[in-house]
Amino acid sequence: MRRAGERKGLAEAGLAGLPLELPRACGPAGPRPAPPPDPPGHLGHRERMRQRLLLAGPDALADYELLEMVLFLALPRQDTKPLARALIARFGSFANAIAAPLAELRQVEGIRDAGAAALKTVQAAALRLAGAELRGRDLLANWEQLLAYLNAHVARAPVEEVHVLFLDTRNRLLADEVQGRGTVNHTPVYPREVVKRALELQATALILVHNHPSGDPTPSRADIEMTAEIKAAAAVFGVVLHDHLIIGNGRQTSLRREGLL
């Protein structure tokens, strides 16, 4: 009966059709709720590291922190700080860790295929970026960039690798190819195969490169003799040997600068 009376009163007041219970008036907006707290444990740590990287740049992170970030992209549910510290303890630096052979990476407890693949992906990206910087450039006029590329590419190889850089008439890189892999102190290289490949690529110049896993870039007698043989074989076909670079651990030797070419 009360409802009927209320409707009658509304009708008399010309308010028929409105709801019986009007919404409450909204008062002034209150303070905004506080943001949710950081996720607990290593998840919050990851977010803080992301923000530090984005706001301050990679130089704000230590080597082990960069390794953490690489690894947690591959291991999203795992605290990767212990793995990163184990890698630094084993290999000494970020660069050494991403360049380490797979067999050695897998010897670090907790590093399996996903973690190893993440590290090797970063290494591959770094090498491609360094190589792209050299494409289309006169290598002899960009010597420091060339040395940086070669140090990243071969300095940490566990056995000797002989690379040949094949160049065109303007000393631009046509190809960087491995001509041989050997032991920790010897790699056989055949001048005939080097020259044959140069002719296939229509290269007019070469730079020989190989690493010394010992870290000491001092040329051996075999290095000097092999250089002379390749220089003589290439000259027969009008191909110039510009240099032979031996890459050690953070050091390198140019046989041309040493007067050995």
Image (cartoon, rainbow, N blue to C red):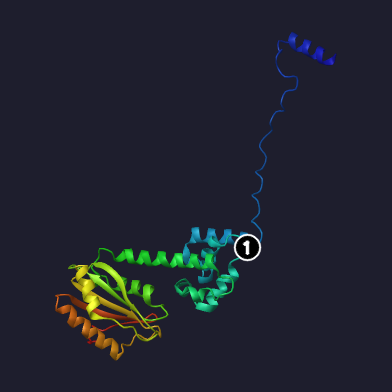
Quadrant of the drawing holding the C terminus: bottom left
| Residue 217 point in image, percent of width and height | 34, 85
How many numbered circles are shown?
1
| Residue 231 point in image, percent of width and height | 20, 81
Q: 48 and 170: which one is in front? A: 170
Left/right of residue 209 with respect to residue 106 in the rendered view: left
Residue highlighted by disc 1: 42
**Farthest residue, direction top:** 12
**Vertical position of residue 111 compared to residue 215: above or below:** above
**Vertical position of residue 2 compared to residue 131: above or below:** above
Place residue 252 in its image quadrant. bottom left
**Vertical position of residue 113 compared to residue 103: above or below:** above
Q: Is residue 261 visible?
A: no
**Farthest residue, direction bottom:** 221
Q: Is residue 21 visible?
A: yes
| Residue 74 point in image, percent of width and height | 54, 62
